[in-house]
Image: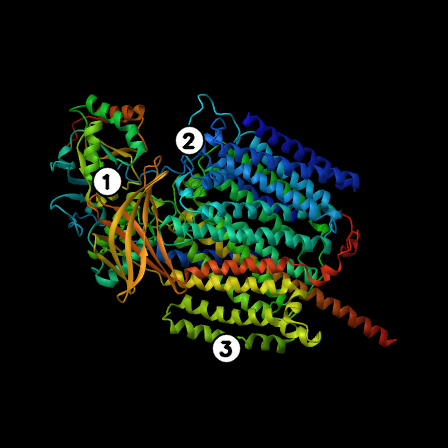
């Protein structure tokens, strides 16, 4: 029983790690400073914000067209709209959410990877902006709990099924024994 | 004057509930018929007091009596009549008072309808219900007093209710439905407490309990659906479920309530799982209190939550007391509920029910952990985190898929499942239907694995549901010599009802899967005459208009919709500005058809007359609501008494000792 | 007495209640900024009249950056305080307003009626707000002489807060400027 519990914990942990793998993959932070070109639709040259020291060089391939749309949608679904309650910036039509979608689009089109863009928002807004908590440290609770409860519950159901089967068999055995005794005399 | 009258009714309710609780338990212990009669009277008195208090509040709201603090808080001269009526539950104190009214009505109903056939338990049941009533009236009389006199000077006008709640009529019915569901869970809970105190439960407990559980579960289903619909029609983001903490809070008791309904079927059929059903009912009740706490304490971020108030700690205390009482009661008395010995196999009807309960409880637990984890993280790590839609979808979708599979496999399997040939045949016969589901999905262009799996499972489940549900109709006329199918159904309406509910679930399930996978959207800034195109629709902006209404200013855009050059009518998405709220609230315009919805949201109105327009097409949304309506109709069928029950109309006051092998407690 | 039930029941409900109890100690609306102690993202923005402000050029003196909008009611509440502050520390602390998703026309109208305490910088596309991780107006960032964010407030500023942070920033030696 104790070994089973330990095994269960291990399994839950493995399951959590499996979920965690894509979420925690991060690129190393690179220090060189490169100024960002202005986003699409920017009005005046020279104006804007310089964020390059946080971003480093784009490590991926610049995206465009449908591929870019898909990448923007994927990133946007994971970022909480700062002004709204539980909505992502993909779902919200609020102006700040639109601005954040535009920012994500601009970064992705320059070749920053999805992970890097998500990490950028996290650096600015804090972990609160991620709709899916990163699977590390204490956050593992939230990733391991569902697998854990299914496993524990499954074990209980399995035990119940086995126990009932055995007790029923025993009943049958005593009955057979009785029959044997009765017929022997 | 009005304040004093209202407070008087609340005080009367508090006294009735307090004494009722005490007398009820004493009458239960002594099995005293006189004590029971007195408890019933006090229960009815409590209901009358609550009706009186609400009537006074409604009178104060309608007469704009701003000397009552709640009216000063939510009332306003400009608010239309119907919204004034609904504003009883638009803010914290009023909603608790309304809660008291519903509890009063439930208690009165339990005291009236359970007089016969449930005598053995009734005193304890009513005592427990009145105990809950004592807490709520105490709350209304102290920290959440809506009748408190407004400190002078009494204002001549108020701010009016929260504009989000004014924006759509659905807000009038969504909260009452949800409260009817939440509060109604008190009744099966009280019955479970009674069963534990009595130390046995049999048929005279199970049948009424199932009915009293079915009713609030159904209200909760409708309430949750209306909440989603409201979110869809009002909030303007094109979706209906955001896994918002408060939405989750209403989802939790719904999940365990349904688990309890299913374990109750096994109990009815096999006499097993008695203790488990009781535990599920108790968890369900605790989750309703937890949900109310989350909604009203302001500890979580949510669209639906009320503002922070002193009510939070009091509610937490009540939750603590209830949890402690439940744990102690279960620990002391659970061994008195002895189930029949059983021999269950995994691949049998019983096995499917066990897995069903496993999945529902796991789902509840997952949602609970996800909802509360931000609080844990903040307490232990000091960091704010979010657990939102992507997480819940990732976790819940596999569990829901499992439930869908069980909905097909479970009812197909025979009870006992000891004959492997029978089992094999039961599982093979619906396979062509699963194949049809798969092919249909492929034909409609579905390529993603989850959608294909759901389609196959749904095809399987649909066949089994229809086969099982229609079985009595097909079988009866032959045996009963040509009596109509209606008569056949009426023999056991609950059987057909259950499968009708399953049918509704299937409809909603498929609609949710399809609508969330195939949503498309486009967004653009338009000047008058410009056209936005999306999925065959051409939406031409004709101009924006500023409409002054008594309680709001509406910016309304006129958008002409056409497909292939043929006009499909005009839609008017709008932005509403309420005088006391700075930020405008959008009202989307929706064109619903059987196939899909076209959903237009006005994002902003520029000073130059241009607009930001967002268009979303979502397939099958309407079927989500239709599915829920089917579920509720199915539940109504389940509530019709079966032929056997109708025959047994003559009351017989036999305590069901026969069904309790163990008899007394330890 | 079924001890198993007792243990499981207490084991589940007690932590749950503790967690909920802890929840009262925190305000769900306030999110700590991860930017405190980090260099402030530098920006060049134009005000309503087209004058360009470059944050990097303001090094050497503390800067107060306030994100605001005319539709935001708490922003009105803190407006007199900012007017007062900008007057009191004139020449010592720079006060910059960054407009958070609002129209230049309404901002200009507001400034004519209520007066302005510093340049109202137009943040086209809201990119500066994103770089500063602004959740919603009003939010105020305090940047020391070295261009490091030392504090941030969400919601209307209180006089004590402003005084406290301003004194802290002014007390910092002016030597380490770049």
Q: Earlier in the sequence, mark 2 or mark 3?
A: 2
User: Which mark's residue is nearer the viewer, 2 or 3?
Assistant: 2
Quick check: do tags 1 and 3 share a chain?
Answer: no
Location of residue B78 in the rendering, given as x and y in whole percent from the top left corner: 40, 35
Chain identifier of the residue bearing label 3 in the image: B
Chain identifier of the residue bearing label 1 in the image: C
Quick check: do tags 1 and 2 share a chain?
Answer: no
In this image, C176 relative to B473: left or right? left
Name the residue: 65% across, 43% down.
B107
Report the residue that reaches farthest toward the right: A185
In this image, C161 relative to B231: left or right? left
Q: Which residue is mark 2?
A: B158
* Quadrant housing residue B598: bottom left
Location of residue A62 in the rendering, given as x and y in whole percent from the top left corner: 20, 59
Chain identifier of the residue bearing label 2 in the image: B
User: Which mark's residue is nearer the viewer, 1 or 2?
Assistant: 2
User: Which mark's residue is nearer the viewer, 1 or 3?
Assistant: 1
In this image, C148 relative to B286: left or right? left
Mark-to-mark CA distance, 1 and 3: 59 Å
Location of residue B77 in the rendering, given as x and y in whole percent from the top left corner: 42, 33
Mark count:
3
Location of residue C35 in the rendering, given as x and y in whole percent from the top left corner: 28, 39
Mark-to-mark CA distance, 2 and 3: 64 Å
Q: Specify whether residue A27 is in view.
A: no
Callout 3 secondary element = helix
Height in image: B173 above or below C54? below
Mark-to-mark CA distance, 1 and 2: 29 Å
Q: Which residue is mark 1?
A: C102
Callout 1 secondary element = loop
């Amino acid at each position: 029983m104790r070994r089973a519990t330990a095994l269960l914990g291990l399994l839950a942990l493995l399951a959590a790690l499996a979920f965690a793998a894509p979420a925690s993959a991060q690129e190393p932070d690179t220090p060189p400073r490169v100024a960002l070109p202005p986003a699409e639709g920017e009005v005046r040259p020279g104006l804007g914000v310089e964020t390059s020291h946080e971003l480093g060089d784009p490590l991926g391939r610049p995206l465009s067209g449908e591929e870019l749309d898909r990448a923007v949608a994927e990133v946007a679904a994971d970022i909480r709209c700062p002004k709204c309650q539980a909505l992502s910036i993909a779902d919200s039509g609020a102006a700040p959410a639109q601005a954040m979608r535009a920012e994500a689009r601009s970064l992705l089109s320059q070749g920053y990877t999805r992970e890097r863009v998500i990490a950028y928002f996290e650096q600015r807004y804090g972990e609160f902006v991620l709709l899916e908590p990163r699977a590390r440290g204490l956050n593992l609770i939230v990733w391991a709990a569902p697998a854990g409860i299914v496993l524990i519950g499954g074990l209980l159901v399995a035990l119940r099924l086995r126990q009932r089967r055995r007790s029923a068999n025993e009943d049958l055995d005593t009955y057979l024994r009785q029959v044997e005794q009765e017929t022997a005399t | 004057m009005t304040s004093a009258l209202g407070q008087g009714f609340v005080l009367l309710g508090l006294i009735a509930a307090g004494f009722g609780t005490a007398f009820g338990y004493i009458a239960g212990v002594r099995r005293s018929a006189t004590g029971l009669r007195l408890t019933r009277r006090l229960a009815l008195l409590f209901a009358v007091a609550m009706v009186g208090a609400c009537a006074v509040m409604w009178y104060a709201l309608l007469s704009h009596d701003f000397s009552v603090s709640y009216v000063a808080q939510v009332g306003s001269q400009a608010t239309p009549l119907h919204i004034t009526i609904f504003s009883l539950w638009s803010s914290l104190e009023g909603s608790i008072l309304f809660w008291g009214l519903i509890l009063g009505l439930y208690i009165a109903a339990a005291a009236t309808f359970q007089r016969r056939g449930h005598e053995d338990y009734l005193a304890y049941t009513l005592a427990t219900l009145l105990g809950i009533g004592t807490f709520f009236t105490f709350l209304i009389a102290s920290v959440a007093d809506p009748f408190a006199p407004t400190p002078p000077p009494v204002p001549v006008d108020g701010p009016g209710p929260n504009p989000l709640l004014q924006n759509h009529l659905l807000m009038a019915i969504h909260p009452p439905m949800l409260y009817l569901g939440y509060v109604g869970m008190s009744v099966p809970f009280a019955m479970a407490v009674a069963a534990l105190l009595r130390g046995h439960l049999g048929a005279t407990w199970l049948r009424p309990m199932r009915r009293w559980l079915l009713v609030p579960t159904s209200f909760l289903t409708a309430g949750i659906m209306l909440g989603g619909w409201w979110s869809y029609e009002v909030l303007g983001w094109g979706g209906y479920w955001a896994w918002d903490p408060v939405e989750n809070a209403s989802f939790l008791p719904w999940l365990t309530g349904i688990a309890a309904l299913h374990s109750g079927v096994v109990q009815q059929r096999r006499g097993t799982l008695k203790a488990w059903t009781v535990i599920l009912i108790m968890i369900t009740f605790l989750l309703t209190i937890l949900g109310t706490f989350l909604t009203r304490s302001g500890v979580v971020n949510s669209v639906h939550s009320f503002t922070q108030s002193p009510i939070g700690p009091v509610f937490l205390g009540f939750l603590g007391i209830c949890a402690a009482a439940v744990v102690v009661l279960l620990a002391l008395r659970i061994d008195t509920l002895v189930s029949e010995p059983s021999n269950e196999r995994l691949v049998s009807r019983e096995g499917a029910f066990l897995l069903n309960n496993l999945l529902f409880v796991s789902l509840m637990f997952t949602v609970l952990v996800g909802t509360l984890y931000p609080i844990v993280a903040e307490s232990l790590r000091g960091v704010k985190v979010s657990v939102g839609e992507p997480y819940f979808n990732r976790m819940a979708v596999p569990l829901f898929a499992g439930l869908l599979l069980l909905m097909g496999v479970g009812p197909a399997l025979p009870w006992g499942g000891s004959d492997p040939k029978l089992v094999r045949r039961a599982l093979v016969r619906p396979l062509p239907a699963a194949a049809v589901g798969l092919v249909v999905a492929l034909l409609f262009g579905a390529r993603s694995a989850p959608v294909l799996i759901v389609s196959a499972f749904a095809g399987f489940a649909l066949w089994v549901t229809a086969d099982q549900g229609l079985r009595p109709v097909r079988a009866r006329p032959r045996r009963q010599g040509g009596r109509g199918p209606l008569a056949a159904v009426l023999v056991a309406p609950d059987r057909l009802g259950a499968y009708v509910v399953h049918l509704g679930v299937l409809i909603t399930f498929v609609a949710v899967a399809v609508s969330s996978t195939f949503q498309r959207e486009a967004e653009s800034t338009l000047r008058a005459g410009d056209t936005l195109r999306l999925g065959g629709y051409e939406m031409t902006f004709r101009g924006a208009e500023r409409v002054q209404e008594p309680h709001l200013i509406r910016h309304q855009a006129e958008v002409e919709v056409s497909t292939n050059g043929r006009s499909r009518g005009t839609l008017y998405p709008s932005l509403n500005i309420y005088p006391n709220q700075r930020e405008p609230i959008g009202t989307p315009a929706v064109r619903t058809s059987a196939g899909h919805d076209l959903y237009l949201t006005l994002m902003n109105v520029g000073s130059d007359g241009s607009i930001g327009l967002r268009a979303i097409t979502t397939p099958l949304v309407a079927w989500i609501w239709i599915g829920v309506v089917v579920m509720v109709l199915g539940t109504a069928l389940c509530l019709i008494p079966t032929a056997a029950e109708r025959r047994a109309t003559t009351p017989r006051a036999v305590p069901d000792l026969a069904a309790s092998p163990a008899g007394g407690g330890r | 007495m079924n001890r198993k039930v007792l243990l499981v029941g207490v084991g589940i409900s007690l932590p749950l209640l503790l967690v909920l109890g802890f929840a009262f100690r925190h305000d769900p609306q306030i999110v700590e900024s991860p930017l405190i102690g980090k260099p402030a993202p530098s920006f060049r923005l134009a005000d309503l009249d087209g004058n360009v402000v470059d944050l990097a050029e303001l090094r050497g003196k503390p800067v107060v950056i306030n994100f605001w909008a005319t539709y935001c009611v708490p922003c009105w509440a803190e407006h007199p305080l900012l007017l007062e502050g900008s007057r009191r520390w004139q020449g010592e602390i720079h006060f910059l307003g960054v407009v958070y998703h609002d129209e230049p026309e309404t901002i200009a109208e507001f400034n004519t009626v209520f007066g302005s305490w510093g340049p109202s910088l137009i943040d086209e596309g809201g990119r500066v707000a994103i770089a500063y991780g602004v959740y919603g107006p009003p939010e105020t960032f305090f940047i020391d002489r070295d261009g490091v964010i030392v504090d941030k407030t969400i919601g209307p500023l209180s006089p004590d807060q402003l005084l406290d942070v301003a004194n802290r920033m002014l007390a910092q030696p002016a030597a380490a400027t770049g």
